[in-house]
Amino acid sequence: MHSADEQDRRVGKRRTVNVSAWADPGGVWPVIDCRIIDLTPDGARVTAASGAELPDVFQLRADSTRVIGAVEVKWRRGNQVGVKFLGSA
C-alpha cells in the first residue's frame, strides 16, 4: 500500500489529457478501448473503457493513425494502470 504522503516518483510533469485510445496487444487479440487519463514524458495512466484487463505489454494508440508507442504496465489499481513507454530511461 502507498501512503497519501508518499512522494510522487515521476521525473517529468504529469499532464491531464483524458483522450480516447486503444490498447493493441498485437497478434490475433482484439484491441481494447481505453482512455489516456494523463501523460508524462515517460508514461501514462490508462483506464480500460469496458473494465477489461489490459495486457502487461501493448501498443498504445491515440487514434487509428497515431501510435504513441509500446508500453509496459508498471502498476494496477482497479481498472486503471500506470504504463511506462518502452525505450524510456
Image (tube, rainbow, N blue to C red):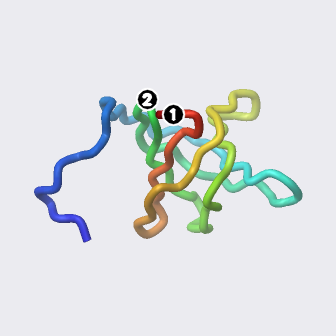
At 60% across and 67% down in the image, what residue appears? 53
Above or below — where is 41 with respect to 18?
above
Q: Is mark 2 on a helix, strand or loop?
A: loop
At label 1, which amino acid type do we have?
Ser
Q: Between marks 2 and 1, how big is the CA–CA gap?
A: 8 Å
Identify residue for label 2. Answer: 41
Question: Whole-percent x and y of residue 19?
Answer: 52, 38
Q: Quadrant of residue 62?
A: top right
Above or below — where is 46 with respect to 17?
below
Q: Comparing marks 2 and 1, which lies closer to the viewer?
A: 1
How crowded is the residue under tag 1: few (<14 C-alpha within 10 Å), some, or many (20+)? few
Q: What element carries label 1?
A: loop
At 61% across and 60% down in the image, what residue appears? 56
In the image, 66 versus 74, the foreground residue is 74
Question: Whole-percent x and y of residue 23?
Answer: 66, 50
At label 2, which amino acid type do we have?
Pro
Quadrant into which the N terminus falls? bottom left
In the image, 55 versus 62, the foreground residue is 55
Q: Which of marks 2 and 1 is nearer the N terminus?
A: 2
Most extreme residue toward the front is 89
Q: How many labels does the image show?
A: 2
At 73% across and 49% down in the image, what residue appears? 24
At 51% across and 33% down in the image, what residue appears? 88
Q: Are marks 2 and 1 in contact (CB under 8 Å)?
A: yes
In the image, 83 versus 52, the foreground residue is 83
Question: Whole-percent x and y of residue 47?
Answer: 50, 55
Residue 88 numbered mark, or none: 1
In the image, 32 versus 74, the foreground residue is 74
Most extreme residue toward the left is 5
Lateral position of residue 79 relative to residue 52, left or right: left
